[in-house]
Amino acid sequence: MILIIYILIFCILVFVTFIGFKAVGTGIEAKKRNNSYKITKNIKKNISKDLIKLDKLYRSGAITKKEFQIAKDKILKS
């Protein structure tokens, strides 16, 4: 009788361990997908911020229209 209980406990332990490893693997995959999304999102934000800063410089008269166009083209191509 005791042997059956130990076998049952061992099977439950193996099952719980399997589910735990599966959950960890799924979490790691989700984190990888999320990180690649953040990188793309940050690049777009940086371009927007750079264009806004460039526009402020142009409006304040710190740079000429030609310099503005050159800088804008560089930002958009990168």
Image: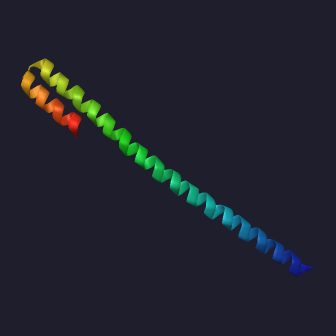
Say above or below: 66 vs 39.
Answer: above
Q: Residue furthest right?
A: 1
Q: Please state which of residues 70 and 21 is positioned toward the viewer in this rendering.
A: 70
The quadrant in which residue 51 appears is: top left
Q: Residue at x 23, y 34 (%)?
A: 76
The quadrant in which residue 16 appears is: bottom right
Say above or below: 78 vs 48.
Answer: below
The quadrant in which residue 48 appears is: top left
Quadrant occupied by the N terminus: bottom right
Q: Position of residue 26 (x, y in %)?
A: 57, 56
Q: Residue at x 67, y 66 (%)?
A: 18
- Look at the image and name its color scheme: rainbow
Q: Position of residue 56 (x, y in %)?
A: 18, 22
| Residue 62 visible, this angle | no
Say above or below: 68 vs 46.
Answer: above
Q: Please state which of residues 74 and 52 is positioned toward the viewer in this rendering.
A: 74
Q: Residue furthest bottom?
A: 3
Q: Position of residue 33 (x, y in %)?
A: 47, 49
| Residue 35 visible, this angle | yes
Q: Residue at x 42, y 44 (%)?
A: 37
Q: Position of residue 41 (x, y in %)?
A: 38, 39
Quadrant occupied by the C terminus: top left
As drawn, is 52 to the left or to the right of 24? left
As drawn, is 68 to the left or to the right of 20? left
- So how many labels did they put on this image? 0
Q: Residue at x 58, y 59 (%)?
A: 24
